[in-house]
Amino acid sequence: QVQVVESGGGLVQAGGSLRLTCTASGLPFDTYSLTWFRQAPGKEREGVLCVFLNGGTVYYEDSVKGRFAISRDNAQSTVYLQMNSLKPEDTAMYHCAARYYSCSGSTADYPYWGQGTQVTVSS
């Protein structure tokens, strides 16, 4: 059984920082790419950042460039999303998703999803 579990969300003031953690089990972690998606109320789920097998990254959301960074620790089967200089528009449910080999910004390409962790940024 594959399990994907996120943690680290919370309430933070604008300009603050959070680090989200995603741990995946039951799959060969080092052959999977992982992407953080987010969904705000009433809006479509959007890709944010993906980390490839070699640690390379793909940005799907221009507004987070220079503020967010994704990284992975294969020994711990864990991916992180470091979020700095948070803005109210970053408020969303953040989901971690895993797929074999290649990054993708499309939700339909991901077979494995976590339950999500809520990030709320106050003004």
Image (cartoon, rainbow, N blue to C red):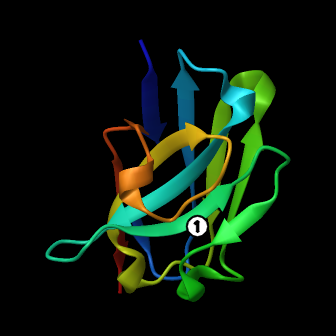
What residue is drawn where x is 58% and y is 87%? 62
Q: In the depicted view, which residue is nearer to us: 101 or 21?
A: 101
Q: Is residue 5 left or right of residue 91?
A: right
Nearer-the-camera pick, 91 or 14: 91
Vertically, is 91 above or below 89? above
Q: Is residue 82 visible?
A: yes
Residue located 72% across and 82% down the image? 66
The x, y position of residue 40, in whole percent, is: 26, 72
Badge 1: few (under 14), some or many (20 or more) residues near its Cα, within 10 Å?
some
Q: Residue furthest right?
A: 54
Residue 111's spot in the image, x, y percent?
A: 40, 38
> What is the x, y in percent for residue 25?
54, 19
Q: Is residue 119 visible?
A: no
Classify residue 23 by image quadrant. Answer: top right
Relative to 106, does residue 117 appear above or below in the rendering? above
Residue 45 placement, left or right of 14: left
Residue 73 rendering spot, x and y as whole percentages: 77, 35
Q: Amino acid at mark 1?
A: Ser
Viewport quadrant of the C terminus: bottom left
User: Which residue is drawn at the image coordinates 77% and 30% (left, top)?
Assistant: 74
How many numbered discs sit on the rendered protein? 1
Of 87 and 115, nearer the camera is 115
- Quadrant of residue 44 within the rendered picture: bottom left
Q: For numbered disc 1, what is the local secondary structure?
A: loop
Q: Which residue is mark 1?
A: 17
The residue that appears at 38% across and 64% down in the rendered structure is: 38
